[in-house]
Image (cartoon, grey):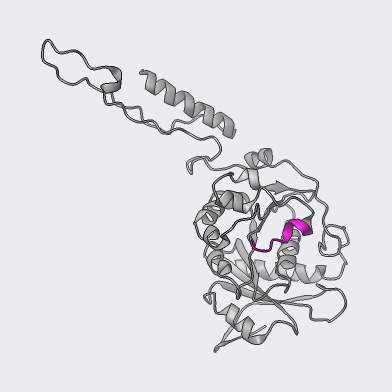
């Protein structure tokens, strides 16, 4: 066995050990290199002059698609952190199952499971037409109510790189996060957090970036979702609002469906219609109507209806 073969085998074993799995050879031993024909009397070529196959360094932080992530790997790389969630907006952290709004989110969960029987639905984008309509609140509490079912693991991602809010609502750090992964400086698990709620994982927005639109469209978000979606039952992605910027339309292409949040008596009808038109019919799985009861609690009641095409209108 050549020294090159031994070095490659050792590198592969070390990579597998760092990933927590058995060592599996994923390379082919290089063919023996025959020295060139020489005339008698010529000086033999040196080792550097001989054609030796190039060796690409193996990285331990980014496993290949041939070595899928495991739940054990996920738990080992994401130790629990102490979150300090906002009690006013995080409905399911205080243990009060009768709190205002909790029943509406359980209903939303049931509707999504019903929709899931008709189409592939795991990665859901949450957005709104305009800012301050409750999309981040919807994303955070939907993730919480989904993970309350036994055996369910949920990943919540803050993809609103322009006005991130989820880290404040959950009471945790915003970096490292999604922007750091999209820039290629961190791997999946170094930007992923696990809080006090069992099986709820969170990727915050990450450090500030000068060009969010270019960052979310570079293709690495789709790569991220492909690499980790097998570890989760649901992935909830909070995005910027649709009308002011183009990010949501780009992010939706990496997800299975879109929930559009509309605030009662606040969202202009033309803005809601314009937001709806940004997504294909099959992508929009429902509309969440926020604030319907008019009480002082800002996010007190939600109502969900599956999207139904009705001419150029949409129904809620």
**Residue 258 sits in quarter:** bottom right
The percent coordinates of residue 92 (x first, y second) are: 82, 60
Q: Residue furthest front?
A: 210
The percent coordinates of residue 33 (x first, y second) are: 26, 23
Q: Is residue 90 above or below residue 51?
A: below
The percent coordinates of residue 231 (x first, y second) are: 61, 49
Q: Residue furthest bottom?
A: 311
Q: Is residue 136 above or below residue 129?
A: above
Q: Residue furthest top?
A: 41
Residue 148 in sight here: no
**The C terminus lies in quadrant:** bottom right
Segment tinted magenta in the rendering: 162-168
The percent coordinates of residue 313 (x first, y second) are: 59, 87
Residue 243 in sight here: yes
Is 164 contained in the magenta span?
A: yes
User: Residue at image x 55%, y 79%?
Assistant: 277
Count of residue discs: 0
In this view, the residue in front, 250 or 246, is: 246
Q: Is residue 99 above or below residue 276?
A: above
212 left or right of 175? left
User: Residue at image x 79%, y 78%?
Assistant: 291
């Amino acid at each position: 066995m050549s020294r090159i073969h031994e070095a490659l085998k050792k590198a592969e074993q070390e990579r597998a050990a760092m990933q927590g799995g058995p060592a599996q050879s994923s390379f082919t031993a290089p063919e023996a290199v025959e020295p060139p024909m020489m005339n008698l009397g010529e000086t033999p070529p040196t080792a550097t002059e001989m054609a030796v196959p190039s060796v690409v360094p193996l990285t331990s932080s980014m496993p290949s698609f041939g070595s899928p992530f495991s739940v054990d790997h996920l738990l080992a790389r994401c130790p629990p952190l102490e979150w300090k969630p906002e009690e006013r907006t995080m409905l399911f952290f205080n243990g009060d199952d009768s709190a205002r709004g909790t029943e509406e989110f359980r209903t939303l969960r049931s509707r999504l499971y019903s929709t899931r029987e008709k189409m592939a639905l795991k990665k859901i984008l949450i957005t709104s037409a305009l800012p301050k309509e409750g999309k981040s609140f919807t994303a955070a509490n939907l993730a919480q109510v989904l993970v309350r079912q036994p055996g369910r693991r949920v990943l919540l991602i803050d993809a609103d790189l322009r006005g991130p809010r989820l880290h404040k609502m959950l009471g945790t750090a915003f970096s490292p996060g999604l922007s750091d992964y999209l820039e290629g400086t961190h791997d999946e698990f170094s930007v992923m957090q696990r809080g006090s709620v069992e099986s709820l994982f969170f990727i915050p927005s990450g450090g500030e970036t000068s060009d969010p639109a270019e960052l979310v469209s570079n293709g690495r978000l789709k790569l991220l979702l492909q690499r980790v979606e097998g570890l989760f039952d649901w992935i909830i992605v909070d995005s910027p609002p649709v009308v002011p910027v183009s990010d949501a339309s780009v992010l939706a292409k990496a997800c299975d469906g879109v929930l559009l949040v509309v605030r009662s008596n606040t969202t202009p009808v033309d803005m809601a219609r314009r937001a709806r038109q940004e997504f294909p019919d099959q992508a929009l799985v429902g509309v969440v109507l926020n604030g319907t009861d008019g009480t002082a609690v800002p996010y007190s009641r939600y109502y969900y209806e599956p999207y139904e095409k009705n001419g150029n209108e949409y129904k809620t």
